[in-house]
Amino acid sequence: MRQTGSDAVDTDDCEIYKSEHVESTITVRYEVSIPRHMNSQDTKGVSQLPVITNGWEGSVGDRPIATENSLEHSRTPPIPMPAGLEPLKHQLAGHRFCEEGNKELYGILDCKDGTILKPVILDSRKGQRERYFYALLADDSSHSPYFNFDVCDFELLRQLKKFTAVYKGLVSLPEHPEVVIYIKMVDVCSTFTRPHIIDVKIGAKCWEPAASPEKIKRQKQRCPHLDEICFQVLGAKYYDAQTGEAVVRRDLRKCTPHDLLHKGLHAIFNILPPNAKESITQFIMDDLQEIARWFGSQSILSFHGSSVLIVFEGDKATLDSNVETNHNRHPSLLKVKMIDFAHVFQTRASDDNYLEGLNSLISYFQSLSHIFRSTSPVTDKAS
Ligand SMILES: O=P(O)(O)O[C@@H]1[C@@H](OP(=O)(O)O)[C@H](OP(=O)(O)O)[C@H](O)[C@H](OP(=O)(O)O)[C@H]1OP(=O)(O)O
Ligand SMILES: Nc1ncnc2c1ncn2[C@@H]1O[C@H](COP(=O)(O)OP(=O)(O)O)[C@@H](O)[C@H]1O
């Protein structure tokens, strides 16, 4: 066991792996840990999908505010896309398919059947934790290079599972190099007619205990008000109320607390019809509070750099028929799911960092709900 600052990092089963990460023109050298027994042959339990090459729709790019159409470009894909699969168009954060220096990076694939594939790179630690985390929740392995739980913790893990996207196993694509396998999971957005999507990374400390000083610096630069806000909106995609065009925003990470609430979140939720605004924000708070209750009850896992994906319906007809005046909740209206478990650690302490971030997010929704209540048409008429 190694101590880094106040956090314990279990490296008993790991060896240090040196890697180079090229970011724009700067090459950053850092060390990462990979399990000693893990190598490119580690494809146990991996199923294969048939593959042929087909067109690539392009990555979503890094422009802060853009419409969906303007984000697509005709860059040649660095690796072929298997038949029927394509890069996930609504991927808001994380790595996309591209080349960085002489390295190929892998993004998330859309299987077009309500499931997606998230890459795991077998000869690095990228994705390994997440792979074993999903296996843990699926009850495939409570003992793995990263997690080792006793039966007394199973109930907490079972409760956690319902907050995450349904895991469908591991998949390899014969057309992609052997070192890449994919975690197959349900696409949280697939059941929506017109999904509005927000990816919120939770916690003021969004890097893992062993993160390099360079990585911590990069993270802090990307979100200058993280210490005050304790969460960051990595991306949002919503449909403009006037034009109907999809808008993708990646500028919200940089906002001050005031602008995040009054310009960022308000702009996103203000596109909803008046009767839906309050209901949807209340339902989101209910779900976040349920997750917070779980965090309040557990001291077995800590989550670094993990997100909640908030997806709510933007289709007017679906909203009209499902938002009832008595504020009953219909399952087709919204989903709040935890995603991105690349840096989840087994621990013996409560995850105060995550809980603080989640509570802060809830308080932003409370403020938003208050704004909507005080500016609702009834109040306007009265004033
Ligand atoms: O911090 P970086 O540059 O190393 O890259 C981040 C990735 O870290 P890693 O490659 O594991 O070291 C990081 O990957 P993990 O979640 O750590 O697997 C994310 O992809 C992150 O994107 P975002 O903050 O979710 O939009 C990535 O940030 P972006 O480069 O996409 O902003
Ligand atoms: N289960 C899911 N359903 C729908 N979209 C998802 C799901 N998981 C991830 N995404 C999309 O992919 C993006 C990146 O996912 P994430 O797991 O955070 O990857 P990374 O580890 O590369 O940051 C999210 O912002 C979201 O848009």
Image (cartoon, rainbow, N blue to C red):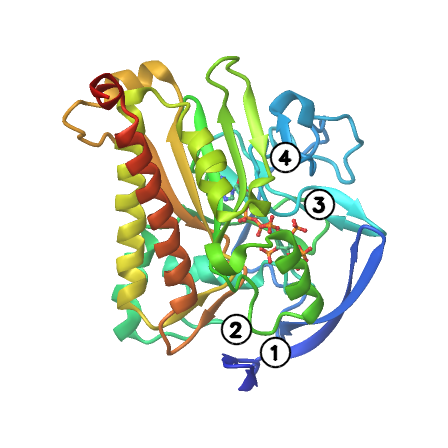
* Viewer-side residue, 188 vs 250: 250
**What secondary structure is marked by label 1?**
strand
**Residue highlighted by disc 1:** 14
* Label 2: how many Cα within 10 Å (few below 14, some 14–19, many 20+): some
The residue under label 3 is which amino acid type? His
SS at circle 3: loop
For this rendering, which residue is in front, 307 or 42? 307
The residue drawn where x is 71% and y is 66% is 214
Could you say which is closer to the camera, residue 245 or residue 252? 252
Q: Which residue is mark 4?
A: 87
| Marks 3 & 1, CB-CB < 8 Å contact | no
First in sequence: mark 2 vs mark 1: 1
Most distant residue in the front direction? 383
Q: Does the Cβ of the disc 2 residue fall within 8 Å of ligand 1?
A: no
Estimate the spatial distance between the alpha carbons at disc 4 and disc 2, rounded to whole Å. 30 Å
Q: Secondary structure at mark 4?
A: strand
The residue labelled by disc 3 is 176
